[in-house]
Amino acid sequence: MDKEKKEESSAIHPAVAPLSYLLGTWKGEGEGGYPTINSFRYGEELHFSHPASGKPVIAYSHKTWKLDSGQPMHSESGYWRPKPHGSLEVVIAQSTGLAEVLKGTYSAEDNVIKLHSQVVANASKVREISRVYEMVNGDLHYVVQMATNLTTLQPHLKAVLKKL
Ligand code: HEM
């Protein structure tokens, strides 16, 4: 590949540009809970990258661990696909076997991303998932809510992460 073509393909796609603040590795701690379980704290690393394919896609992965022992907990990975006019679709495969397709919006002004599940597949209890990601003073905050067969939509996870 000649140099010009290479530079072109490693450039950020215009559709990804408004979300480019996400690109990189984030690390922090979170807190989980739900009416039916004991609450817990966890460590987390999140990674967003823009594959060199030049396509309008952000690759996403996260892993979590127990704070006391470092033992791995939940992990997931997927793709974030920004669309025109501030809309966004996301697919995520979880280590538990659950698969999510989410749709929502992003705001370039206040860096808030709101997603709601269109599909939750291969889940015994989960019926709905919502995710909100927000930049606050340079930190990435998120809240994940879920609805199960017994409980309406309410928080399961919240975390604050710093860029490495
Ligand atoms: C429990 C779903 C992410 C840790 C649960 C339960 C569900 C669930 C359905 C059982 C609730 C009940 O019995 O009523 C999900 C979904 C997630 C997610 C949909 C992502 C969207 C995570 C993450 C962690 C985690 C990231 C760890 C950092 C736990 C723990 C429990 C639990 C410790 C309680 C113990 C257990 O039942 O295994 N989760 N979870 N979950 N989740 Fe998650």
Image (cartoon, rainbow, N blue to C red):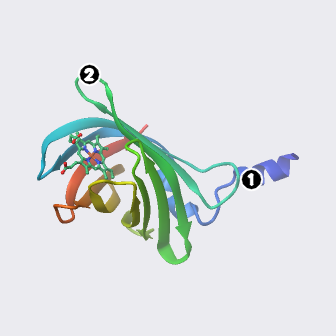
Whether residue 14 is situated above or below residue 84 in the rendered picture: above
Which quadrant of the view contains residue 83?
Answer: bottom right
The x and y percentages for residue 110 are 37, 66
- The residue drawn where x is 22% and y is 24% is 68
Residue 158: give x, y in percent of width and height. 25, 50
In the visual, does 17 lie left or right of 40?
A: right
**Outermost residue, bottom side:** 85
Q: Is 102 left or right of 147, judged from the image as shown?
A: right
Q: Which mark is residue 9?
A: 1
Quarter of the image for residue 134 reads bottom left
- Label 2 or label 1, whichever lies nearer to me, is 2
Viewer-nearest residue: 112 or 115: 115
From this viewpoint, is residue 111 visible?
A: no
Tell me the quadrant of the picture where the N terminus can be found.
top right
Residue 43 % position (x, y): 30, 35
Instruction: Name, please, the residue furthest toward the top.
Output: 69
Q: How many marks?
A: 2
Residue identified by numbered label 2: 69
Q: Nearer the viewer, residue 123 or 138?
A: 123
Q: Residues within 10 Å of mark 2 (few under 14, many from 20)?
A: few
Label 1 environment density (alpha carbons within 10 Å; few <14, some 14–19, many ≥20): some
